[in-house]
Amino acid sequence: MWSIVALLFLSFVAYLFTDELIPKLKELFIKAGLFGIDLCKPTKNKIPEAIGVVSGCIFLVTCFLFIPIAFGNGLMDRAHFPHNEFAELLAALLSICCMLLLGFADDVLDLRWRYKLLLPTIASLPLLVVYYVNFNSTTFIVPWPLRPWLGVSINIGFLYYIYMGMLAVFCTNAINILAGINGLEVGQSVVIALSIVIFDLIELTGDQYKAHMFSLHIMIPYVATTLALFKHNWYPSSVFVGDTFCYVSGMTFAVVGILSHFSKTVLLFFIPQIINFLYSVPQLFHIIPCPRHRLPKYSAETDLLNPSRTIIVKKDMKFLTKLIVNIASILHLVDAKEDGDSIVLNNMTLINLFLVKLGPMTEVRLTKSLLLFQILCSGLAFTIRYPMASYFYDTAK
Amino acid sequence: MWSIVALLFLSFVAYLFTDELIPKLKELFIKAGLFGIDLCKPTKNKIPEAIGVVSGCIFLVTCFLFIPIAFGNGLMDRAHFPHNEFAELLAALLSICCMLLLGFADDVLDLRWRYKLLLPTIASLPLLVVYYVNFNSTTFIVPWPLRPWLGVSINIGFLYYIYMGMLAVFCTNAINILAGINGLEVGQSVVIALSIVIFDLIELTGDQYKAHMFSLHIMIPYVATTLALFKHNWYPSSVFVGDTFCYVSGMTFAVVGILSHFSKTVLLFFIPQIINFLYSVPQLFHIIPCPRHRLPKYSAETDLLNPSRTIIVKKDMKFLTKLIVNIASILHLVDAKEDGDSIVLNNMTLINLFLVKLGPMTEVRLTKSLLLFQILCSGLAFTIRYPMASYFYDTAK
């Protein structure tokens, strides 16, 4: 318990340090050419980009400094040092550090998509080896109603490792595509992180006590440094967080989910990201034309955001495109209008969908609405995880 | 033994991949503003900078991919998995990954000196914890002649950890300050790395077999990726390697020295860097004025390099400055000339000293001379380590 108090103290210092360092480093980033223009503002100021690397580095350093405290007992009694737990923490930090590097390289160099998918997979390799040697539990418990057919549990073996590798790729990219308006990337990450912390605190009394302590050791410094970043990234943003932040956050959630064995619960906290991803699939796979940016359109006169749109030329439409547009229109999931020889419809992101359904609104209100949705989804996740799970499984476990 | 064959194969693939990737990524780096102008050339072409991040990333990825092979036996028999050795490798890779990140951040953002000294210290923390729990040997064996006074061995305890932390800082910065002409940073690192590989191969028959296998696991992919980088960085350089490369290399050598328990031998391979560092001290600590660049001066007419110089105004000279200039002049270590109210002397780097002693020469000849010196010093290091050590210690150990 003392170690958590020490960690809270260290994390508080990390918060203060991040909060102080970010404004100091802004000029350095702009000088290095790492800046962007806020497309949803009337002014065209240079806003420093990729500041997630600052909070990410301080997050890592805090975890490093915490190592001797976390393993204090083990260090006193070296014969019984928990090498396996230590290897777990090192693998977790290694994967996060790799994503920090990749994210920063991506912000600076603007890497191709194949690297964005390949590198998180490789970065999660140490994690998978640790999982294999420490647990190698590749069994899913089957819900009650399905047991007559599938038995009590299914061992999916090697497929479980593919699932975990893909989890890392999914988490790192899912946050990255639900982004673009001030404070949204960081805000959603804070909500997810706090949901994980609450879940850990609830489970601390259970028999998976150790796994949830491990999760807290990583999540507490993450929350602290991310809150400091949130302060500077909130509307109107004085810094942008860059891919760096999204990658580090995604990997942190994946790492905690994998090594603390609650990856399915972590995925429950990603409901808005999953919806956004599924909704984006037609554009991501270019079944529907995908412009370079799918940000909402800012109107300087009204200071409101409107959904941005994509254009499909009717005669180029393939069967699959037509099918998807029709189904989505029937389900009221897109706002499609015929315009002479083409069809104009909103870009298929959750952000644009909110604008279609709720009407044009200010940027800050849009961010607040999306974050409220994220919080409601976390509430739903807890409902699925606790009361509902007992209908399908023996216990709440 | 099979694992080494697999590693050689993996490393060969890594060499080919690095060699192919570097030219492809050049434009990406220039577009991102990561380029420099070669000051020792008549042309003013943009040369991509910080390419060390490419070889560094491939080096890390190769090490990741090798993990399942290295621990193949352990993976078959999970009950006897060597968690401590695995933690060692993870800590090593974590420290190297941190330096890769720091180096790249330094190249992009041009960090202050205090971060350059602070961050390697923190990056080596996981390493020191691993050392503590796995070995915690903080004893120096005392050479024969001193034993009547000091005993057979001295346990320096906590100071040993300070020494190891400083080793990481020294190694990362020592290569960085013996640099500036085409191919020198990479060339010296290749010589040091190959010296370590030779040392490992000699010691493979000894009782420290495992430690030297560990060292080879890291050094072989390092040598492969660095050789590919060397090819493109050799005179006339088509890429610059940046601080990234120097930091990764320094940390790699420090990691191997610390975890394989031959840090003193590693330091023996750093003789030219130590000479350069000691020679630079008066300028690094601003006892003698230190211009921003201490590169040799290129003369376009002769295509030769001349030593660059610094100017000391006589009336501003403090006692310590005067003392050092006088001693260095008496020992013929600087070329100092009076020029009216000031003294002009060569910038105190090994590169300039070579030009002072051997006369102006072409860049490629200067690099070759310095690399030859590095090779001779490695020969000297082996002489000290083997024949001479037996005079001072019981065995060659």
Image (cartoon, coloured by chain):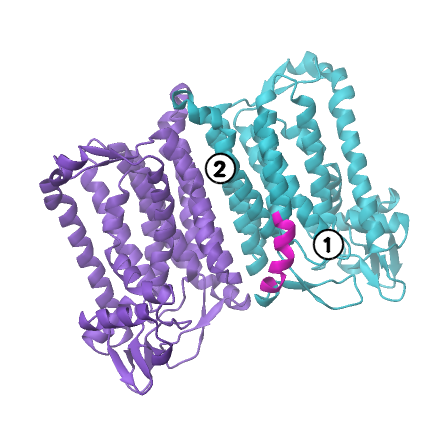
Chain colours: A purple, B cyan
Q: In the drawing, does residue A322 fall left or right of residue B305?
A: left
The answer to which of B146 and B396 lies nearer the viewer is B396
Figure quadrant of residue B170: top right
Q: Chain of mark 2?
A: B
Residue A178: % across, % down: 32, 63
Where the C terminus of chain B falls, by quadrant? top right
The stretch drawn in magenta includes residue A298 = no
Q: Dot 1, how many residues are within 10 Å of its Cα: few (below 14), some (14-19), or many (20+)?
A: many
A194, above or below A347, in the image: above
Q: Magenta residues?
A: B17-29
Q: Secondary structure at mark 1?
A: loop
The answer to which of A355 and A85 lies nearer the viewer is A355
Q: Earlier in the sequence, mark 1 or mark 2?
A: 2
B377, above or below B18, in the image: above
B212, above or below B245, in the image: above
Q: Dot 2, how many residues are within 10 Å of its Cα: few (below 14), some (14-19), or many (20+)?
A: many
Q: Secondary structure at mark 2?
A: helix
The answer to which of A163 and B340 lies nearer the viewer is A163
Residue A324: % across, % down: 27, 68
Is there CB contact under 8 Å for labels 1 and 2? no
Q: Chain of mark 1?
A: B
Residue A25 seen in the figure = yes
The three-letter code of the residue at mark 2 reads Leu
Q: Nearer the viewer, mark 1 or mark 2?
A: 1
Q: In the drawing, does residue B250 fall left or right of residue B288?
A: left
The three-letter code of the residue at mark 1 reads Gly
Q: State the residue position of label 2.
A: B125
Task: Residue at 53% x, 68% y: name it.
Answer: A33
Residue A71: % across, % down: 38, 31
Q: State the residue position of label 1.
A: B180
Residue B95: % across, % down: 52, 40
